[in-house]
Image (cartoon, rainbow, N blue to C red):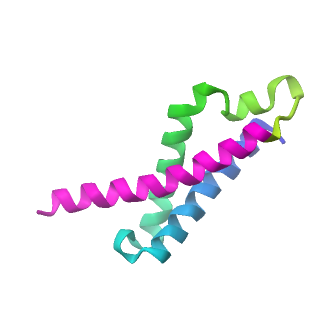
């Protein structure tokens, strides 16, 4: 796996987590397109914010060595970013429409 492929997979995981969370909790949904956009930006934001801790894609592929534990943390944080991004966007949406 390359760093670019890991990045793309983590973004897809963020998208899927936002869509699934929106399906289970209708209160937080923005539709398919909205959840997709929020999943992308939420996962990227969280990965970029906490990637300095050592689980960004280039640390996972450090010198050609593959670290599966860091990859699992990356995917977990990406899914969490999609869900938190969706919750934050809904909170901002409700505040702006008061």
Q: Quadrant of the N terminus?
A: top right
Q: Is residue 39 left or right of residue 56?
A: left
Main SS category, magenta section: helix
Q: Is residue 95 left or right of residue 21?
A: left
Residue at 48% across, 41% down: 45
Residue at 67% across, 42% down: 73
Q: Quadrant of the C terminus?
A: bottom left
Q: x%, y% of residue 83? A: 48, 57
Residue at 44% across, 53% down: 84
> Closer to the camera, 84 or 39?
84
> Closer to the camera, 60 or 69?
69
Question: Is 78 in the magenta?
Answer: yes
For the record, the magenta segment spans 69-98
Q: x%, y% of residue 22? A: 46, 71
Q: Is residue 23 above or below residue 12?
A: below
Residue at 66% across, 27% down: 54
Q: Is residue 58 above or below residue 4?
A: above
Q: Residue at the far right: name it.
A: 65
> Closer to the camera, 85 or 11?
85
Q: Is residue 6 left or right of residue 53?
A: right
Q: x%, y% of residue 95? A: 18, 57
Q: Is residue 52 above or below residue 86?
A: above
Q: Quadrant of residue 94?
A: bottom left
Q: Residue at the far left: name it.
A: 98
């Amino acid at each position: 796996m390359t760093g670019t492929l890991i990045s793309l997979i983590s973004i897809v995981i963020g998208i899927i987590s936002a869509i699934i969370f929106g399906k289970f909790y209708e209160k937080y949904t923005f539709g398919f397109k909205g959840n997709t956009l929020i999943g992308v930006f939420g996962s990227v934001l969280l990965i970029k914010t906490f990637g300095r801790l050592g689980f960004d894609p280039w640390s996972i592929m450090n010198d050609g060595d593959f670290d599966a534990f860091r990859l699992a943390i990356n995917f977990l944080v990406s899914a969490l970013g999609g869900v938190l991004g969706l919750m934050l966007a809904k909170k901002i949406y409700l505040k702006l429409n008061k």
